[in-house]
Amino acid sequence: MTERAQTGPGRRIMLGAGAAMLGTAALGTAAAPAGAAPATGSVPAASGGHRFRLDLPVPTVIGHRGTSGYRPEHTLGSYQLALDMGAHVIEQDLVPTRDGHLVCRHENDITATTDVAAHPEFASRRTTKKVDGVSLTGWFTEDFTLAELKTLRATERIPGTRQKNTLYDGRWEIPTFEEVLRWADREGRRRGKPVWLYVETKHPTYFRGLGLGLEEPLVKLLRRYDRHRRQSPLILQSFEPSSIQRLSRLVSTPGVVLLPGAGERPWDFVVSGDPRTAADLVKPEGLKWIASYAQGIGPTLDLIIPKDSSGRLTEPTTLVRDAHARGLVLHPYTMRNENTFLPAEFRRGTDPVAYGDAFGAFRAYFATGIDGIFSDNPDTALLAAADFTGS
């Protein structure tokens, strides 16, 4: 990507319907005067009209699944630590139970993230399914009632890489999204400011085919907890553009389209026969289409700066510049501290699970002008952001 204007302390993301604008004004709504030039450091709106602002620093640090670098992912313990560390936004991934409750798991396959295999009463639930074209064998949330899932406990997903996280295996149960909303409201009242959430619909086409559509029950909860407005402290996200389109018709909460590797297609595109890939969606015409219903994109970091065959970073693409020209904010994913996840030039030593030069990698990505980043290690990301902005 290309370099963007220098950021500074206190800068805030300002999102609009199909457009975005960057600046430092307080949370609220505003209409752009006809013919007015954009303010210094702002991104021109793609479609004019009303704009609203998210009271979030730039670069925004998003706690990926909470603090999955330090606690088993998608647990209240992981979310609480992310909040205590100072993460600006905390992510939840949503999948349904058999009886229609939304729970927080990265995948509906809970084999690696719970102790379900140790429960003989559920041995017969182990099965093989094809989810978004991929054959998986294990246990799946849609085959359990909420009451049954509540008998399980969360475990570390990658214990070989994050051995210290296994200390917390069995400590927390699977949270429902409603429990997270209640937790966020309590913490918001205690801290005197809202707790921001970043909510992903997982495999929405697959679940809709099972009669377990995600969007409608999600919208009910957003309305119940007053997070359905343009200024609400919540961002919606999905790898399936049609899910964000559906949500945009039901609530005013801002939406972000997640983008996988360049040659990959969203699963709803596969099902509908849409031939476009992520490489098509990051072109100006693709970004214009996204901006017609969403306020941002969440590309994989390789779409921001590709890697060569040795795993080293190459030249940034033009995605930051092109997305900002369409008024879209960019929240790429995912930065992690361990060598195995870092670009080759930032690895230190030969141990793949040891920490590398994460600060150097953050510097390289922030320099492209991205608006925020998902990180498994929010404390590292926050220090890197402070270094970058000089705050």
Image (tube, helix red, strand yellow):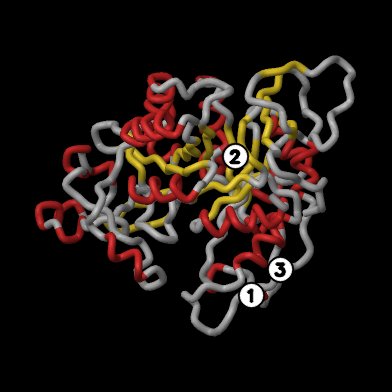
Residue 95 picture location, percent across and down? 36, 41
Determine which quarter of the picture holds residue 297.
top right
The image's mark for residue 257 is: 2
The image's mark for residue 344 is: 1
Taking the view exactly as shown, the residue that stands out farthest to the left is 121
First of labels 1, 2 by sequence position = 2
First of labels 1, 3 by sequence position = 3
Q: Are marks 1 and 3 in contact (CB under 8 Å)?
A: no
Determine which quarter of the picture holds residue 225.
top left
With 255 as the anchor, is 207 left or right in this view? left
Residue 275 picture location, percent across and down? 64, 44
**Residue type (three-letter) at the residue carrying disc 3:** Leu
Q: Residue at x 49, y 57 (%)?
A: 376
With 292 as the anchor, is 342 left or right in this view? left
Label 2 to label 3: alpha-carbon separation: 24 Å
Residue 354 picture location, percent across and down? 49, 76
Q: Residue at x 14, y 56 (%)?
A: 119
